[in-house]
Image: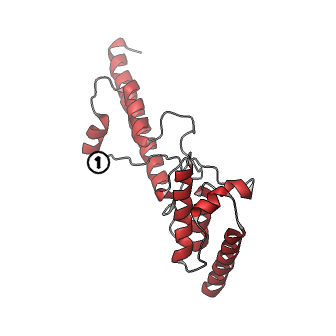
Amino acid sequence: MYPKHEKALKAQLRAHMLKKLLSVVLLIDRMKTANITPFSTLFMKNSEIKSSKNVLIALCKEFLKSEGDVIRHLAACNYQVTFEQTAVDEYDYNVVNIMNDLKDGVRLTKLMEILTKIAPNTLLKQLRVPAVNRLNKIYNVNVAMSQLVDFNVYNPIEAKVLTHSLTHSLTYSLTHLLTYSGYCRRKSG
C-alpha cells in the first residue's frame, strides 16, 4: 500500500464504521421504542449505560475527539434516540411465592394490565420501582386496585392490608377479574 493513500483510507474506514455504528444504535433504539425487539431488556441490569443517548456518548468518546455535545449535533441531522431502560423494564415478573410476590404491587399491576387489556406499561409507568419501603408498596398496590375499581369488578381491599398480608378478598377479586376477562374474550371472539 502506498503511504500517501494510507492516511486517507484510515479516515474513510473510521467514517464508515462510525456511520454503521450510529445506524445500529438508531435501529435498535427505534425497535425498542416500538416494542418489536425479541428481548425484554436492552442493557444489563448492572450496566452503567441505560439509554441510547448514553451509548452514543460512550461511542463518540472513543471515535470523535473534542466533538462537544454529540447528541445536539446528531439532532441537527435529524438523528434522535429516545429509549431509556427503567427499573420496570428490568423487573422479574415471575411469581415464586404468591403470598409475598404480590405485596410490592408491581406484579399485581402487571397482572391488571394484562387482564384488563389496557395498553402495555400504562399503569407500570405510574409505579415507584423499586418499592423499597412500605409507602412505595402501598402506592403501587393502590395503582393496581384502582384498575379493579375502574372495571367495576369488586370493591378492593385497602392497600395497607394487602402489603401486610395477602387476603382472601384479593383472591376473590382476582378470580372475579379472571372470570370477567375470560367472559369478555369469549364475547368479543
- Quadrant of the image occupied by residue 115: bottom right
Q: Is residue 81 left or right of residue 108?
A: left
Q: Quadrant of the N terminus?
A: top left
In the image, 180: left or right of 132? right
Q: Nearer the viewer, residue 73 or 167?
A: 167
Q: Position of residue 27 (x, y in %)?
A: 45, 48
**What secondary structure is found at the residue carrying circle 1?**
loop
Would you say 21 lies left or right of 44 here?
left
- Residue at 44% in and 52% down: 30
- Which quadrant would residue 25 be assigned to in this image? top left
Chosen colour scheme: secondary structure
User: Image quadrant for the C terminus?
Assistant: bottom right
User: What x and y, as percent, mark residue 31?
Assistant: 48, 53
Is disc 1 surrounded by few (<14), some (14 to 19) or many (20+) residues within 10 Å? few
Farthest right residue? 97
User: Where does residue 184 sit, x and y in percent of width and height?
Assistant: 62, 83
User: In front here: 133 or 101?
Assistant: 133
> Looking at the picture, does residue 76 appear above or below residue 185?
above
Q: Amino acid at mark 1?
A: Asn
**Residue displayed at 58% across by 56% down:** 106
Q: Residue furthest bottom?
A: 187
**Circle 1 sits on which residue?**
78
Residue at x-position 43% and y-position 36%: 55
The location of residue 49, given as percent across then percent down, is 47, 35
Most foreground residue, 13 or 81 = 81
In this orientation, does residue 117 appear? no
